[in-house]
Amino acid sequence: MAFHYSRRKLKPREEEETGELNIVPYLDILMNLILFMLLSINGLAAFGILNVNAPSYGGPSSTVAQPQDADKPQLTLSVLISKKGHFVNSENAILGKNDGAPTIPLKADGAYNYAALNAQMVEIKKAFPTETKVIVAADPEIPYEALIQTMDAIRETQERPHRLLFPDVTLGAI
């Protein structure tokens, strides 16, 4: 048996054919998947954060009568964010100056006055306690943070405990 073992050692060993694994196609697929996932997560995060209601198309059906109180005024509240400040108005009347000046102008340092906007929303809510809808529109140059902080000032009071003011926010276009 030892002889047989030694014969095997003396024989020239045949080279085993070893090939290298080409991982370039796998890396290409992996990079495409990573890019796709990053882009889709970024897009979903932007849409998942905002809690806004889409506008409804069409009015109530003509066959179904909607009871409305004739003595209660209807409020279609809208808030426009511009470079000058916040314009607050309704379908029935402009709530503030009518000379082209914003309802809530910018502060002296050029920042938006969210506390004054919130106080204005509290006063409007006192006049219309059952209303919950507001339309928010902004100039295209307005920063995203200004839109979010405006929505926060419109939705609930700043003091604790928070009370809901106008939680149904619809984003509009100018």
Image (cartoon, helix red, strand yellow):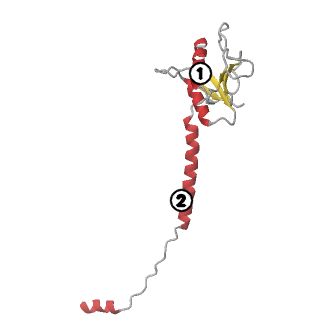
Residue under pointer 1: 116
- Disc on res. 30: 2
Dividing the picture into quadrants, the one containing residue 145 is top right
Distance Cα–Cα, label 1 vs label 2? 51 Å
Q: Position of residue 112 (x, y in %)?
A: 61, 28
Task: Give the label, 1 or 2, closer to the camera.
Answer: 1
Relative to 21, is 66 on the left or the right?
right
Relative to 99, is 128 on the left or the right?
left
Q: Position of residue 69 (x, y in %)?
A: 65, 9
Mark 1 residue type? Ala
Note whether residue 130 is visible. Answer: no
Q: Quick check: 56 above or below 64?
A: below
**Residue lying furthest left:** 2
Mark 2 residue type? Leu
Dividing the picture into quadrants, the one containing residue 34 is bottom right
Q: Nearer the viewer, residue 21 or 65?
A: 21
Q: Nearer the viewer, residue 72 or 65?
A: 72
